[in-house]
Image (cartoon, rainbow, N blue to C red):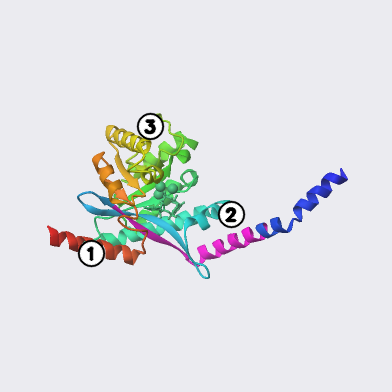
Amino acid sequence: EAKISGKNALRFFDPRMQLAVQERLRLEEEIRLGLKNGEFILNFQPQLEQTEGIIGAEALVRWQHPLRGLLTPAAFIAQAEHAGLIHTLDQQVLAQACAQLARWAETPEFAHLSLSVNLSAHLLYQDNFVEGVLELLERSGADPARLKLELTETLLLDNMPEAIARMTRLKQHGIRFAIDDFGTGYSSMSYLQQLPLDQLKIDQTFIRRLPDDSSSLTIVRAICALATGLGLEVIAEGVESEPQRGMLLANGCHRYQGYLFGRPLSADAFEELVRSTEADDGVTA
Ligand code: C2E
Ligand code: MG
Ligand code: MG
Ligand code: MG
């Protein structure tokens, strides 16, 4: 008895563990403060269609940390989730995405752009999620048809009936849906028939192994065929090289995203890229 509690006490006072706990609490406090101070901003990674050029962007959250500079989601998403702050974060991301869409709609050269936004696990199932999204859209004046929400398979399979109900309601307003990281989750094919989807996003792990790895190519081909057969759009993420792009095009995937076309950029830099590529098109046409 005494031995056990002694062991536990020892474990509790393990200085490394105590440090880890302190660090986590400090990070959570910083995230809370950062949310209050508007330190979470969006970067935009271009999404292209073979003939149309840049058709939109994926919004990727970044933390403009006062001391540590620009941080990517790996440094804070899990912690925000743990601290119960992910809903606030995603809410802010959605609000910024809607505001951005509304601004683009006012400028002819950007009015055609759409924006994909990542939803973390469980936000979809929050009370009033549908109302919240619709309210953000209405308040910003953004066109719901230009907003795409990216969900993961595992998240959807958590509670299919509820996911279908909520997605269907949003879809009635024109909002579109993509399955992110497709091919890596718990791929049961039947859910593809039941969900009101618009797009499959081929996970970058398969793209990374192109053009040399034949099993990755087989999977990419299968996903493209699946998407086409089901009447869904397909987009590849993580396209880094010309041979990869060529292979995707040859297999019916005409939409891409990846470092080959652009890294995630600030809003200004993204707009500059859209401007310059549109100018290019004018010259070559
Ligand atoms: P994701 O949605 O699958 O986003 C794609 C990730 O791949 C991004 O990393 C992007 O920067 C990176 N990427 C894009 N093109 C390439 C490429 O050509 N090569 C390589 N190696 N990587 C590429 P990032 O921005 O670090 O985001 C990581 C993940 O964090 C995202 O994965 C998404 O699941 C999550 N995330 C991002 N923004 C948000 C957000 O606003 N809310 C939530 N809940 N999650 C987010
Ligand atoms: Mg995504
Ligand atoms: Mg992805
Ligand atoms: Mg991912």
Is residue 107 shown to the viewer in this render?
Answer: no
CA gap, disc 1 and disc 3:
41 Å
CB at mark 3 closer than 8 A to ligand 2? no
Q: Nearer the viewer, mark 1 or mark 2?
A: 1
Q: Quadrant of the C terminus?
A: bottom left
N-terminal label among 2 and 3 = 2
Residue under the image location 34 percent in, 64 percent down? 267
- Give x and y (percent) for residue 9: 80, 52
In the current view of this chain or complex, which residue is farthest to the top?
Answer: 190
For label 3, the SS is helix
Residue 35, image x, y percentages: 51, 62
Please, what is the three-letter code of the amino acid marked with disc 2? Ala
Residue 40 is left or right of residue 224, and the answer is right
Q: Residue drawn at (86%, 45%), measured in percent from left and top? A: 3
* Viewer-proximal residue among 124 and 279: 279
Residue located at (27% from left, 43% from top): 247
Q: Amino acid at mark 3?
A: Gln
Q: Residue at x 56, y 54 (%)?
A: 79
Q: Is residue 107 left or right of residue 264?
A: left
Question: On the image, numbered disc 3 is attached to which residue?
Answer: 194
Identity of the amino acid at label 1?
Ser
Residue at mark 1? 276
Mark 1 and mark 2: Cα distance apart in space? 42 Å
Which picture quadrant has residue 202? top left
Q: Which residues are magenta?
A: 21-47
